[in-house]
Amino acid sequence: MLGAAPFNWQLSGSYFVVAHFHYVIVGGILFALFAAFYYWYPKITGKMFNETLGKLHFWLFLSAFT
């Protein structure tokens, strides 16, 4: 989006760039951390999570984040 000259001219140095960057980075980090936790915790402890609660957590987190 910012590769187009008219958009870049209007949006550069604005809060849009800062907010979009943080929104994407924070979302990517949080989703990756939760995914790693759900993947590695059962391998480390040998205890499985309830799949229904895991799906509920994902959909609630996704809807709250967007």
Image (tube, grey):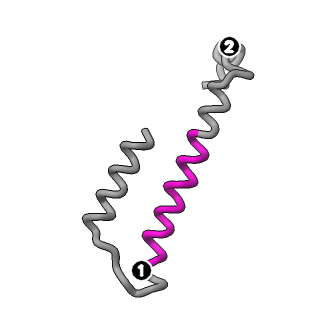
Q: How many marks?
A: 2
Residue 64, compared with residue 12, is above or below; it is below
Q: Are marks 2 and 1 in contact (CB under 8 Å)?
A: no
Which mark is on residue 42? 1
Q: Nearer the viewer, residue 1 or 57?
A: 57
Q: Residue at x 67, y 32 (%)?
A: 18
The kind of residue tagged 2 is Gln
Provide residue 61's location: percent of width, then percent of height.
40, 50
Per the image, is 40 magenta?
yes
Residue 46, compared with residue 14, is above or below; it is below
Label 2 vs label 1: CA separation?
49 Å
Provide residue 8's location: percent of width, then percent of height.
69, 19
Circle 2 residue: 10
Name the residue at the right extreme. 13
Instruction: Please identify the quadrant where the N terminus is shown.
Output: top right
Residue interval drawn in magenta: 23-42
Q: Residue at x 39, y 47 (%)?
A: 62
Could you classify mark 1 by the number of other residues whose Cα lies within 10 Å: few (under 14), some (14-19), or many (20 or more)?
A: few
Q: Residue at x 36, y 55 (%)?
A: 58
The kind of residue tagged 1 is Pro
**On the image, which quarter does residue 65 sit in?**
top left
- Main secondary structure of the magenta stretch: helix
Element type at marker 1? helix
